[in-house]
Image: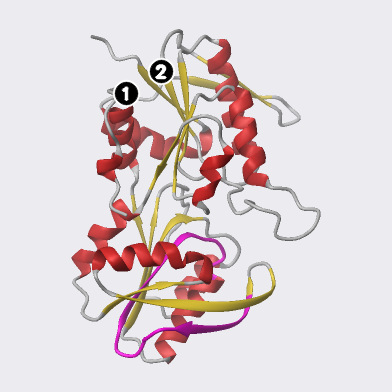
Amino acid sequence: MESRVKFFAGSASKVVAEKIAASYGSSLGKVKLIRFSDGEIQISFEESVRGQKVFLIQSTMPPAENLMELLLLIDAAKRASAEEIVAVLPYFGYARQDRKDQPRVAIGAKLVADMLAVAGATRVMTMDLHADQIQGFFDVPVDHLYASTLFMPHILALNLSNLTIAAPDMGGSKRANAYAKYLKCDMVICYKQRTQANVVDHMTAIGEIEGRNIVLVDDLIDTGGTLCKAADMMMERGAISVRAVCTHGVLSGKAYENIQNSKLTELIVTDTIPHSETGSKIKVISVADLFAKVIYNIEHLESISSHFIV
């Protein structure tokens, strides 16, 4: 029986999309993107998707054009009579805007969820949302994958003595606790104070650091300010080494410089966001096989829970 699954990619995630399709045993379908002289984009499929289950792969990191491109892909698939439309967002942009943390601000994550549904997505697949509760913003099924499935084997392979998992802030304590329980090791929580976004004024830690090999875990790294400050603080307090595993390598601003000049031994990220460069301390692990396996299970109506470690 011929497979009804077809893969298409937005321009921002073409590399990882090619890997996902290849891991599944398929290839990317043909998409035509026309750009008008004023920058407006027009999307069209160059092959039939009628009655097909289409997986549209695109991370929605800035610029906002990446999100718009995904919305146009979804709308084009809907109007071309695709039977099912699965929006695959390896990185769900705007996830940090998940609540009103101050007066008169938008909840960007909810807005994006609404736009995907209105465009015509019948299912959403993503990885390591900034807050698990964002799944509740959707009225369609959400497959929320965890990079711990990829990071755990890497951490175990390091065979570190006196291993300690650390959360770079209070918000990451739940994630760090899950890692610590699985690895049967201690946990440290960092407490930070900010006066403005992306700038940490003061940081301290709760837990034993001296003589420990520390692994910081987080869902994303942006400018690297928090992680680098945490690593430097821990080394000053007697840690043997400090590493970090972060699912989404946003790496904006002076991130590469901050990481290179910090006391981090290494930073492990995934390829949910493409990286034009990587410093000597940065290692990239691909999410392609994990996404391909989950897509296979979805297509064959099989459970996907076996792919979750924590």
Confirm whether the magenta stretch covers residue 6: no
Q: Secondary structure at mark 1?
A: helix
The N terminus, quarter of image: top left
Q: Earlier in the sequence, mark 2 or mark 1?
A: 2
Residue 157 versus residue 47: which sits nearer the camera? 157
Residue 308 drawn at (x, y percent): 30, 47
Task: Please say if the residues under marks 2 and 1 sit with CB atoms less than 8 Å apart.
Answer: yes
The C terminus, quarter of image: bottom left
Residue lying at 69% horizontally and 47% vertically, measured from the top left = 107
Amino acid found under the numbered disc labelled 2:
Lys
Confirm whether the magenta stretch covers residue 206: yes
User: Which label sits on residue 130?
Assistant: none
Residue lying at 34% horizontally and 35% vertically, measured from the top left = 20
Residue 105 drawn at (x, y percent): 76, 53
In the rendered image, the vertical position of residue 65 relative to residue 36, given as above or below:
below
Q: Main secondary structure of the magenta part?
A: strand
In the rendered image, the vertical position of residue 87 relative to residue 43, given as above or below:
below
In the rendered image, which residue does mark 1 sit on? 299
In the rendered image, the vertical position of residue 236 relative to residue 169, given as above or below:
below
Amino acid found under the numbered disc labelled 1:
Glu
Q: How is the image coloured?
A: secondary structure
Seen in the image, is 117 located left or right of residue 182?
right
In the rendered image, the vertical position of residue 31 relative to residue 99, given as above or below:
above
In the rendered image, which residue does mark 2 sit on? 53
Q: Secondary structure at mark 2?
A: strand
Check disc 2: other Cα within 10 Å, few if <14, some if 14-19, many if 20+. some
Query: Magenta residues, as a range?
Result: 200-224
